[in-house]
Image (cartoon, rainbow, N blue to C red):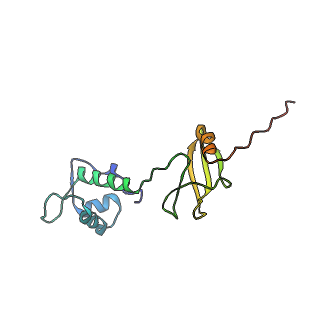
Amino acid sequence: MSSRNNPNRIKSHRSYTVIEVSELLGVHPKTVRNWIRAGLPIADEKRPLLIDGADLKIFLKLKRKTYMHKCEPHEMYCFKCKQPQLPDAESLRFIAKPAGMAVMTGYCCECGCLANKYVSWRDVDSISQKLGRKLPKAEKHLNL
């Protein structure tokens, strides 16, 4: 589902036609009709079909949840395998980002596809230990 299907654009206390929904969300009218066939409730069978804003919001939120996958902290979602996978411990890298975040980069153990995931910098040690990999220790700097 693309980012243009934002449920926050829809007003709960308003009814919409198929054309209005398609213009509001930036999708084709056939897409809205497919949503109706897939279970989006309509007010009645008369033309033009009216869709309640509250029902549309709920439908889009539930549709978005079906695409989300929950990964464990030491797993990454592989787009080729289409499921959470463990990364290869040898290819695992952590790149520091601002605000206490890090990018975990590695290759999938099953297919070898590259995967990325944002993690908290506090969790880097526990993730490394779960995957059986030791982080390199920082070298001591000389004080001049």
Residue furthest to the top in view is 143
- Is 6 on the left-hand or right-hand side of 91? left
Of residues 118 and 108, which is closer to you in this image? 108
How many labels sit on residues?
A: 0
Residue at image position (32%, 53%) is 62
Q: Position of residue 26 (x, y in %)?
A: 35, 61
Instruction: Give the quarter of the figure containing the N terminus.
Output: bottom left
Q: Quadrant of residue 108?
A: bottom right
Of residues 25 and 113, which is closer to you in this image? 113
- Is 56 on the left-hand or right-hand side of 6? left
- Is 79 on the left-hand or right-hand side of 32? right
Q: Quadrant of residue 138?
A: top right
Is residue 99 at least partly visible in the picture? no
Of residues 74 and 58, which is closer to you in this image? 74
Q: Position of residue 131 (x, y in %)?
A: 62, 48
Residue furthest to the bottom in view is 30
Q: Position of residue 56 (x, y in %)?
A: 26, 54
Q: Is residue 36 above or below residue 130?
A: below
Of residues 120 and 60, which is closer to you in this image? 120
- Is 73 on the left-hand or right-hand side of 24? right
Is residue 136 at least partly visible in the picture? yes
Residue at image position (63%, 45%) is 128
Residue at image position (59%, 37%) is 122
Instruction: Give the quarter of the figure containing the C terminus.
Output: top right
Q: Position of residue 100 (x, y in %)?
A: 59, 38
